[in-house]
């Protein structure tokens, strides 16, 4: 079977994004995730099953099965913008490693059409799944949410040992790696928390470290899914706090920025 026939389950395609990789990008959001981060702004991504969500008072189906060849024209439609801006395709989720063959096929199709390719992934999966996508990948954007495995598990549902091990292996393979931390007050916003992650990122040879301020944009979606948002009392970190944490991270000697 041609790789173009490979099928996967997605829940959104977002065009003209200026986040999650360089330049102007199209982002394909995969359905299904291994983790359950308390602050997740895409709760409709977590279940692999196709769901119904209430949005703006109306029922909306979340999730559809598509092949690479079905969605490739939509991705390639913005090729002139990618070329001018150095952009391309980013796969996000959910967790793209839940569907590694589909992810690899999409990345391959993008690369064969001359597009820059990136994934946004927690890397919480056996390394064999990551190896499937690496040949077609220019940039790995990886979240590290906490260096303390117990706290990582408390807030995401998963320990961090496998993630840290995979981060080292990805960097060793020479793939451009950017480590990112969603900075969530009371969860991982102390100088010690950020210093530990930025030092780790620098030690494995990551290219950059990005601090992403926590936001509450996805909280209404929990209501639409009949769920409760588990961090109702947490507010986004003030800009001064982010600047302070940026300075802390920069002490590790890695190129840092706020936002991604
Ligand atoms: S890894 Fe990402 S998609 Fe999965 S639960 Fe956490 S924030 Fe949500």
Image: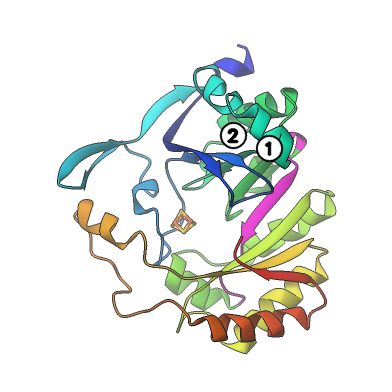
Whole-percent x and y of residue 255?
78, 69
In which quadrant of the rendered view does residue 154 lie? Answer: bottom left
How was the colour assigned to the protein in this rendering?
rainbow
* Image-quadrant location for residue 205: bottom right
Q: Nearer the viewer, residue 218 or 201?
A: 218
Label 1 element class: helix
Viewer can see residue 41: yes
The total number of labels drawn is 2
> Quick check: 12 left or right of 208?
left
The quadrant where residue 96 appears:
top right
Determine if the C-beta at disc 1 is less than 8 A from ligand 1. no
Q: Residue at x 75, y 79 (%)?
A: 250
Q: Which segment did they paint magenta? A: 135-147
Rendered-image quadrant of the C terminus: bottom right
Membership of 138 in magenta stretch:
yes
Residue at 74% from the left image edge and 73% from the top image edge: 200
View extreme (left): residue? 57
Q: Nearer the viewer, residue 224 or 47?
A: 224
Residue 75 inside the magenta-drawn segment: no
Using the numbered discs, state the Cα–Cα distance from disc 1 to disc 2 in whole angstroms: 7 Å
Residue 70, compared with residue 85, is above or below; it is above
List x then y, in percent, for residue 167: 71, 59
**Residue named by callout 2:** 103
Q: Which mark is first along the chain, 2 or 1?
A: 2
Whether 39 is drawn above or below 127: the answer is: below
Residue position for label 1: 133
């Amino acid at each position: 079977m041609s790789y173009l026939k490979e099928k996967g389950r997605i829940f959104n395609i977002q065009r003209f994004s200026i986040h999650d990789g360089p330049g102007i990008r199209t982002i394909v959001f995969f359905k299904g995730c291994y983790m359950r981060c308390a602050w997740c702004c895409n709760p409709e991504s977590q279940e692999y099953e196709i769901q119904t969500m209430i949005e703006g008072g109306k029922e909306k189906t979340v999730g559809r099965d598509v092949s690479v060849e079905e969605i490739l024209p939509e991705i390639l439609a913005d090729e002139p913008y990618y070329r001018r801006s150095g952009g391309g395709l980013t796969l996000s989720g959910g967790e793209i490693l839940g569907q590694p063959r589909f992810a690899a096929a999409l990345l391959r199709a993008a690369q064969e059409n001359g597009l820059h390719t990136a994934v946004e992934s927690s890397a919480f999966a056996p390394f064999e799944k990551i190896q499937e996508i690496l040949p077609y990948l220019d940039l790995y954007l990886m979240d590290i949410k906490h260096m303390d495995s117990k706290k990582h598990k408390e807030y995401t549902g998963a320990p961090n040992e496998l993630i840290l091990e995979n981060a080292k292996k990805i960097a060793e393979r020479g793939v451009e790696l950017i480590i990112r931390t969603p900075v969530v007050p009371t969860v991982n916003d102390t100088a010690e928390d950020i210093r530990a992650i930025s030092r780790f990122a620098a030690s494995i040879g990551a290219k950059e470290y990005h601090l992403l301020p926590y936001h509450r944009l996805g909280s209404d979606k929990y209501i639409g899914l009949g769920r409760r948002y588990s961090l109702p009392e947490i507010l986004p970190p003030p800009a001064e706090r982010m600047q302070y944490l940026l300075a802390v991270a920069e002490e590790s000697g890695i190129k840092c920025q706020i936002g991604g």
